[in-house]
Amino acid sequence: NIVLPEDVIYLLDTLNKNGYEAYIVGGCVRDSILGRQPQDWDITTSALPEETKSLFPHTFDTGIQHGTITVVRNKVNYEITTYRLDGEYHDGRHPDAVQFTPDLKEDLLRRDFTMNAIAYHPKEGFQDPFSGREDIARELIRGVGVPAKRFQEDALRMLRCVRFAAQLGFAVEEETRTAMAENAALIEKISAERIHEELDKLWRSPYPEKLPLLLESGLLPHIDHLWAEQMGRLGEGLIPQLKAAPNTSACRWTLVLQNYREAEAKAFCKKLKFDNSTMKEIVLYLRHFHEETPQTAYGVRKLAGTLGEDITRRLFRMQAILHDKTAAQKAENLLDQVLAAGDCLNLKGLAVNGEELMAAGIPKGKHLGAVLNALLEDVLREPAHNEKNYLLQEAQKRKDEV
Ligand code: ATP
Ligand code: MG
């Protein structure tokens, strides 16, 4: 039995009292059976969207064209979707039309995998026409009905399949796996954003051991040919690397792009519609990832001053994967020390600024920049030198040198 949050029971009761069927369905049922905390609780109902709307005071129509009403209760959003069948798919992406149905079984039939096609109601128990619970017990991902047909309807399901395998540690049932290999080319119809989103979840999953499933799926060459070759070369060597890396998008993507030059990585990120800040972070890691980890306070200050505290720390953890773990640990300890000491790391932290130097007679322009950088270099090596009078004197001395 599944223990439901009180608000979910209230939503089901309200629909039932008004004469409608209602069940929790999909990911929340699957996760509850697995003893995992569901991310959100989705409800499927015989009530039409307008009927659902009329029963609750606070709703949104965000997914109404698919039959989904969002109900807000105690600041939590719940998606309540009318039982529906998906009409014919002609483009391998979107059903031509959404059609409502009074039959729960038809709604379950449109779902992707047996483990995602289970409904549950506290009084009615499980509605599980495709034996999803048996597959969950066997740790198997199986397409509902004829897997090849389901992948032809919506090619994104192939990537979802691999992603769920890596999230749950499940195997993929044989016919489903074959269907994936045979229909892999259809992934070309799926938008870059959705491919990006699934791959992102995949890298950040707890079972990178499932990587061979992706490598053997045949999907990669249809996402990006050059990258597929790189991935083939990295092969299963990526598995321990993914496990060891910080669990952020930028770190995990850096690993799968580790042999790319900066420009190639940028082009790939643009193609797969990365946001700018993630793309920039990946490029920074690629720039420094293969370098030796700094082993002096000076080297650590310099890096932290350019990359910022957080990226520097993650860079060290990334470098630990390729190089020496002890060296990476030492670098991180040094980083803690320079941060705790409040050492100056870049021009912003310098005890004099450009205006003060100009007031002291250093000419504006190129010259000023060179003096500032020389002072910073001095302070990076010796933090005690970050003192206004000392720096102004130094500036005078260097005035003619630079
Ligand atoms: P997650 O933990 O990633 O949210 P989930 O199973 O809840 O997993 P969602 O994308 O939130 O996945 O979708 C909710 C449910 O809708 C799924 O469990 C499945 O029943 C159905 N579903 C989602 N996407 C598809 C799809 N592309 N094809 C068929 N059914 C789908
Ligand atoms: Mg979900």
Image (cartoon, grey):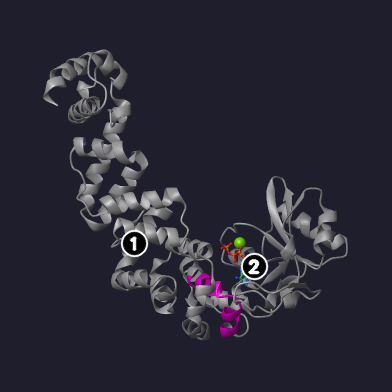
Q: Label 1 is placed on what type of residue?
A: Leu
Give above or below for 289 relative to 197: above
Q: Label 2 is placed on what type of residue?
A: Gly
The residue beneath circle 1 is: 257
Question: From the image, which quarter does the C terminus lie in?
Answer: top left
Give above or below for 121 relative to 176: above
| Disc 2: residue Cβ within 8 A of ligand 1's nearest atom | yes
Callout 1 crowding tier (Cα within 10 Å): few <14, some 14–19, many ≥20: many
For numbered disc 2, what is the local secondary structure?
loop
- Residue range corresponding to the magenta coloring: 148-162
Q: Can the viewer see residue 368 in this picture?
A: yes
- What is the residue that sits farthest to the right in this orientation? 18
> Looking at the image, in which quadrant does ligand 2 appear?
bottom right
Residue pictured at 21% horizontal, 55% vertical: 323
Callout 2 crowding tier (Cα within 10 Å): few <14, some 14–19, many ≥20: many
> Along the line of sight, which residue is nearer the eye, 302 or 280?
280
277 left or right of 123 in image: left
The x, y position of residue 133, in whole percent, is 61, 75
**Image label count:** 2
Magenta stretch holds residue 118: no
Whole-angstrom CA distance, mark 2 to mark 1, is 33 Å
Q: Can the viewer see residue 143 in this picture?
A: no
Task: Give the foreground label among 2 and 1.
Answer: 1
104 left or right of 153 in image: right
Quarter location, residue 62: bottom right
The x, y position of residue 118, in whole percent, is 66, 72
The residue beneath circle 2 is: 26
Residue pictured at 24% horizontal, 48% vertical: 328
The x, y position of residue 178, in whole percent, is 48, 85
Is there a contact, CB below 8 Å, between mark 2 and mark 1? no
**Which numbered disc, 2 or 1, marks the residue that appears first in the sequence?**
2
